Each structure stands twice: as structure tokens, then as C-alpha cells.
Amino acid sequence: MALKYITAEEAASFIKHGDRVGFSGFTHAGCPKTIPEAIAQKAIEEHEKGNPFQIGIFTGASSGDRLDGALARAKAIKFRTPYQTNKDLRASINERQLDYFDLHLSELAQYLRYGFLGKVDYAVFEAADVTESGEIILTNAVGIVPTLSHLAGKIFIELNRKHPKELRGIHDIYEPKDPPYRREIPIYSPSDRIGVPFVKVDPAKIAGVVVTENEGEGGKFTPLDEVTLAIGHNVVDFLAYELKAGRLPKEFSPVQSGVGNVANAVLGCMAENKTIPPFTVYTEVIQDAVIKLMDEGLVTFASGCSLTVSNPMLDQIYERLDFFKQRILLRPSEISNNPEVIRRLGVISINTALEADIFGNINSTHVLGTRMMNGIGGSGDFTRAAGLSLFTTPSTAKDGKISAFVPMVSHLDHSEHSVNIIISEYGVADLRGLSPVQRAHTIIEHCAHPDYRPLLKEYLEMGIKGHIPQNLKCCFAFHQELEKSGDMRLVDWSKYR
């Protein structure tokens, strides 16, 4: 069946108010760009006519500004899941202009297949190649494409010529059966291939192909500062100590790290510590630092859902694609983030906390418990199943006016039961096997900023007698003081005695 080549505007003309649309991609990687912008323009034109136009959006994770940003600015989003990082979309969420469903990334594909989130009317995929028989070669991410490909009524392809056809072979496309027919996911090392290198669809479902030449949206990371580097060194020193103590296998365990500067700092510091042997990566996002370590021989293989790298790094990967195709696999998010596989492999998970309380609970998502930052993403997928779960955070923010360590988190994403280790620029709090009071002393002494340690110790002494000595009269005093004066350091416990 011959493919039909159309314009982005023609593709957008199919999309109606109230439709639910699934997009490829995981972070900015692998996201379509031209068709979402055309949909956004259609929304603007419909709104100018006085007509309603909003759609529901499903993606693998967050997306680029040309998808989430364009549609948010056009007021074209009615519903969004499972994750986002765009400032304009974040503002719309916090102004409650749309419904946002924050969800563990590994669960979305299954939720869609179960019908929990309604039907998928259309899907839009960025591809490096597509054949007349319906074989789609994705670009630098997979996300939830395998599930969208058979649930969507019609599919549009953005054939992006910036990505080479030779990407065929870097993807491992596998979709598990739903219970009660599901079998084990047969991954026993990060390099195991279990699927096929393409997404196969009925070519009759492909409503059109839009040819593009879109650059990626992978900007460079902010240069590392002293605090970030100190956290990175503390993480690596801790892992080296665990290795020497025999609590990690001598071959080392696969590593997962979240997105951002701290993750890149940790991986960069691993190259400097000669105790750490060459290791593998089983993660969701493969970042620049992983590629650099692969070049140096310290990372031997990386399995993920996306190549979330800077544009210059992506160019380097494509220039040496034969080398990297032997060392990288890109999988669907329900495989890259699958707790069964994470538990089997004994993955070391390293994620970032927005705030932590002195008893070991983590808030990853909400500022002051109310304003969404990004979402839980894949941190829960890895934390709850990891062989060793670590959370990192700078001890303070806003020139010391905000403490990352508080009496009680203002929103709970990861409970004390899932958190093994917390690390700041000041040190490491190993919480394994500790009671709540022991955890509190450890976190205060090793991770909290010195300016806040006396305040946190005083709060602990004020705690109501019990297994966890919280004081419900003043457990949010840090947050209340921040809203009142703009500085958590000004908390006065005498008012609560």
C-alpha cells in the first residue's frame, strides 16, 4: 500500500475538539514537532472564531517545547498525562486550566490498554523511516508507541530526515501481554534483546506522512557548580564504600539516574573513582554523561527509553552509529521502567528530591505541597523496586532561605519504606535498618544545612511521644514561615510550646 504524503496542516485538520491524541517521544527526544505546532495553530484559529478546541494528550513522559509548549500556549490542552517539564504547561496546570494526571511512567501503556483513560483517537509518531508494509523505525526514543500503534484509530508519521534510517536496530520493541496471560519479561542483563527493531502497524492505519527536517530540542546542561559536584562525589564515594564492604557485587550493579545536572555530575564523578569497575546502565533516559563514559570504556552497555542528549552529542552518536548500536538499546517505557526487571537486575537508582523530611519521606513533585513542578516521572518505578535506592538534593535553595530538609514533607511521593539513602552536599544519610528517630538524627547530622540543624533538632525534641515523634501543631512551620517571611530560618518554635 502506497504511503500518502501530506502537510502538517492537513494532518491537523483531522483532529477535532475533544479528541485524545497520543504522541511518540520520551522527554524532548523522539517527539513530533511540526504536526503539534499545526494543531496548536488550528486551536488558535478556532478560538478566534469563538469555537472550543482542546485535546487530551498522552506521551511517554515529558516532551519538547514544540509539543507541550506550543499546545499549552494555544490553550489547546484539556487533559495531560503522565509527566511534563514545560514552564508554560506547568503554569496552566497550576492555574487549573487543564486536568493533569500525574502517573508512574511504567503504568501508562497498561492503563491505556485496560481502557482506564478512554480511547485514543489519533497517534503522531516521529520516525527515521517508514515502509509501505507498515514498519516504523523510530528516532531517539520509544515511549508508549507500541501501545499507541494498535490503540489509535489513525496514525500520522513525521518522517524526520535529521535522523538516519540506519537507526534500525537500536530499538528493542516489546509489548507484554496483559494479565492473566502475561509471562515474565525475559531480561536478565541490560543487553538482552527481547523484541524486534521496529513498530509494525497495519499500513491502512497510516493516514499520512509529513516529511520534516527538524533539529532536536536537546540544549546543553548548566555548568556544574560546587554543590552539584559535592553531591556527585558523595554519591560515588558511598558506592565505592559499599563495593569495598561487599554490599554490592564486585561486577557492580546496573545504574539508573534521573534527568538533570546532579545525574550528570554523579556519572561524571564515577569516571574519577578508580574503585568503580566498568558497569552497565538500566535506566529511562540516557544522557550525555553516559555516552562520554561509554567512549571511555567505563559504561559497557546502556538500556533506556530515550537518548536524551544535547544536539551536539546526538550528532556525535549518529557519526559513529555502528559503534553505539552495539552498546545501546532503546525500549518502550513499560519495559525500561518495569519494576519486575529493575528488581531482578538489582538496579542502583539515583533520583532527585524536591524536599525530604527528617524521617526519610520524599517529595518529588509539589512546591509547598500545592504547586506542581514536573511530576513523579519514573522515580517511583525505580525507587520502589531498586536493589539500592538513593535520593540526592542540595541542602538549601534560594540563597539558604529554603531548606530541603523539613519536619514533614508537604507532599508525599516516596515513603520512608522505599528510601534507602539520602545524600546532600554535606554527606550521606544511610537509613537502612534505622528507627524513625535514628533516621531523623542521621539526616539532620549528615545532610541538613548547618543553619537548619538546630531548628530540626529542636523540632524533634518537641515531637509527641510515639513511634514517629511528629508534632501536628507545627510540622509545617517551615513552609508556613516561608510563605509569611520568605525565609525558613526565621521559624520560632517558642510560639508552639
Image (cartoon, grey):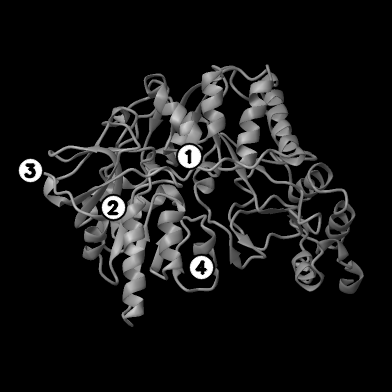
The spot of residue 360 in percent (x, y) is 69, 50
Name the residue that disc number 2 marks: 124
- Type of amino acid under label 1: Thr
Q: Looking at the image, is mark 4 or mark 3 nearer the viewer?
A: 3
The spot of residue 472 in percent (x, y) is 75, 69
Residue at 77%, 38% in the rendered image: 226
- Type of amino acid under label 2: Val
Q: Earlier in the sequence, mark 4 or mark 1?
A: 4
Residue at 61%, 68% in the rendered image: 370
Q: Is residue 186 left or right of residue 275?
A: left
Name the residue that disc number 1 marks: 308
Mark identifier at residue 135: none
Name the residue that disc number 4 marks: 93
Q: Earlier in the sequence, mark 3 or mark 1?
A: 3
Name the residue that disc number 3 marks: 1
How far is disc 2 from disc 3 in space, using C-alphas? 19 Å
How far is disc 4 from disc 3 in space, using C-alphas? 42 Å
Residue 127 visible (yes or no): yes
- How crowded pointer 1 is (Cα within 10 Å; few <14, some 14-19, many 20+) is rated as many
Task: Name the one closer to the observer, 336 or 226.
Answer: 226
Q: Looking at the image, is mark 4 or mark 1 nearer the viewer?
A: 1
Q: Is residue 133 left or right of residue 405?
A: left
How far is disc 3 from disc 1 in space, using C-alphas? 34 Å
